[in-house]
Amino acid sequence: MDAKSLIEVENLSKVYGEGDAAVEALKGISMNIEQSDFVAIMGPSGSGKSTLMHLIGCLDQATSGHYGLAGRSVETLDDDELADIRSHEIGFVFQQFNLLPRTSSLENVMLPLTYLRGPSTDGRKHAAELLRSVGLEHRIKNWPNELSGGEQQRVAIARSLINDPSIILADEPTGALDSKAGDEVMAIFKRLNEEGRTIVIITHERYIAEYSSRIIYLKDGRIETDERH
Amino acid sequence: MNVIESLRTAYRGLVANKLRSFLTLLGIMIGVGAVVTMISIGTGASSMVTTQIRGLGSNLLMVQPGSAGGEMGGGARQASGTGTNLTLDDSKAIGKEVNGVTAVSPEYSSQTQVIYKDKNLNTSISGVTSVYQQVHNFHVLYGDFLSDEDQKVGAAAAVLGQTIVSDLFGQANPIGKTIKIKNVPFRVIGIMESKGQSGFQNLDESIFIPLSTAQKRLFGVDYLRSINVEVATEDQMTQASNEITALLMSRHKISDPDQADFNVRSQADILNTVSQVTGTLTVLLGGIAAISLLVGGIGIMNIMLVTVTERTREIGLRKAVGARRRDILAQFLMESVFLSLLGGILGLLLGMLGSMGIANIGGWPTVVSMSSILLAFIFSAAIGVFFGVYPARRASRLNPIEALRFE
Ligand SMILES: Nc1ncnc2c1ncn2[C@@H]1O[C@H](COP(=O)(O)OP(=O)(O)OP(=O)(O)O)[C@@H](O)[C@H]1O
Ligand SMILES: [Mg+2]
């Protein structure tokens, strides 16, 4: 292998529970994701897509196997170091948006800055710019309950960008949106990818997956197909 | 995450549920208020009693019948001041034989009825001798005090305390008038200066008559309630106390000091006893009030647990965007400490108001001391930490994935 990939996954497996109740959600996944790639993960329900994304996002540790992120072996890291990686390297976008209620769009976008250890920049200005870049400059002061689903998801995307992460992980980001709002959200991801960001999304919809340049198909905890298009 | 940030986050969390936060805070507020008020009552009482006892004079020894008290296992003992074995001869012997004694005041006092015209009251009658004024540093203001002659002949003469004068005579001049004590007519010959509460009795509410008259004509006894001994200097107190003990033991034919049928105490001894009693009182009152503080603390814990459950998804999100365990811990701990500290401050104000109210309405002196203010602060902060730690730890240990999935 020549240049190190951004994400290196080798024979990764994840078992939930113990004994009789144990569920093997991932059964030896191996793959690499390069810097600036745009990957869609597809597969039937229960195939382990979310589980894989949680491992990639350092929200959880694998049961066995190796996961290298930007040259660091994630399996050797402790809780605080994982939190640091999430803070600096990873931006999450969730199906259910997960914005703080009774909190303005701007404050929501700024939330990750709270936990950023390092030099502080002018967060307010940066957050406002990000909201403008997702077309929400007129919704800066609104609370989430005053926004449409598509708008909420765009706030969430702006939030995922505030710490300037190298990877954006999105678990069914369009799952709660209609196709028009979904297309708007995907257009943003497409643009971000063209600007050089690595993006991994999970989706059930073929037309959403078409925005990506590579589709990994999971089935029963294993990679079934992995192709560029 | 710095302190200001977590304070802000905590503040927002609390403001989001104003009524709930206020009700929780109320628990602490009432608790701290109650503790501060109760301690102020106890402290006030103790400082009042202490100044009064100090006012009695520091070179007095008080001899009373009954055991010294305190020791256990002596069987049924007489309570101090209730025996019948101190006599006028004992008193005279002390004056003659003990070194350093400058004056000896034998006293017998009892509660009985006093009548003047259509007014009557039940008050303390003290049978004393002419040295009483000197020993107690308590003097006659108008007219004369009781003389040695009065004592010798058992005269029916009375000197009144100020409260007695106003109760029986109002504005009229009582000197020369006749009052009836236990139906025996007494001529009023003087009025004492005002002294107020002294020890456990209010001297302004006393009537002074010759000891001989009190013992023989009024109450028909031949013993004393107490002998107050004035010693020349404070340095001689211990020596004099020991000599009095030895003298009275030999006079009463007692060889074992533990069996003594009297006790000799100085101001310092009485002060000690009293401050022990008022100290216990303060602790007791404060302790009872502290229970309400405890209940307030449990209220905080309860609300924090509810908050943590309600905000599980928020916690998951915060962790997903990089919050460490200790960030979450700090956030929720800050919320509970903020609540309890604010409750503590408001409770302190409530307590100060309460103690002022009691002082005004109840006429009971209260003192909100610096230490009880400090105690209120430290206690309420400690309660916030103590009852906040468990919910906050619970929040900080949530698994981010499960927290995000929480419905
Ligand atoms: N916390 C957990 N405890 C036990 N089993 C779990 C847990 N999380 C996931 N699983 C199991 O692991 C398997 C994979 O779950 P996962 O959520 O990764 O599926 P998915 O591909 O994301 O499905 P979906 O498309 O429905 O979101 C499932 O069988 C699921 O029941
Ligand atoms: Mg899933």
Image (tube, grey):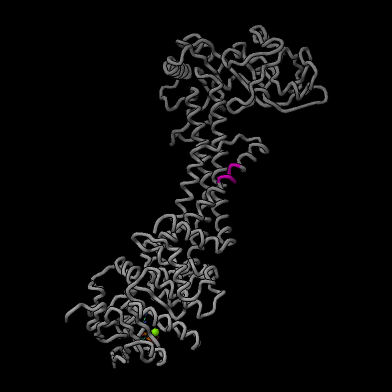
| Residue B298 seen in the figure | no
Residue range (magenta): B348-352
In percent of width and height, residue A101 lies at: 52, 70
The structure residue drawn at horizontal position 26% and vertical position 80%, both measured from the top left corner, is A34
Q: Is residue A31 visible?
A: yes
The residue that appears at 52% across and 40% down in the rendered structure is B282
On screen, B314 above or below B291?
Answer: below
**Quadrant in which the C terminus of chain A is drawn:** bottom left
Residue B181 drawn in magenta:
no
Q: Quadrant of the N terminus of chain A?
A: bottom left
| Near-viewer residue (B195 or A166) | A166
Q: Position of residue B153 (x, y in %)?
A: 68, 8
Which residue is pictured at 49% across the width and 67% down the height?
A106
> Within the displayed image, which quadrant is ligand 1 positioned in?
bottom left
The secondary structure that dominates the magenta segment is helix
Percent coordinates x, y for residue A208 in the rendering: 41, 89
Question: With respect to residue B94, does A93 lie above or below?
Answer: below
For image coordinates 49% across by 25% down, the residue present is: B261
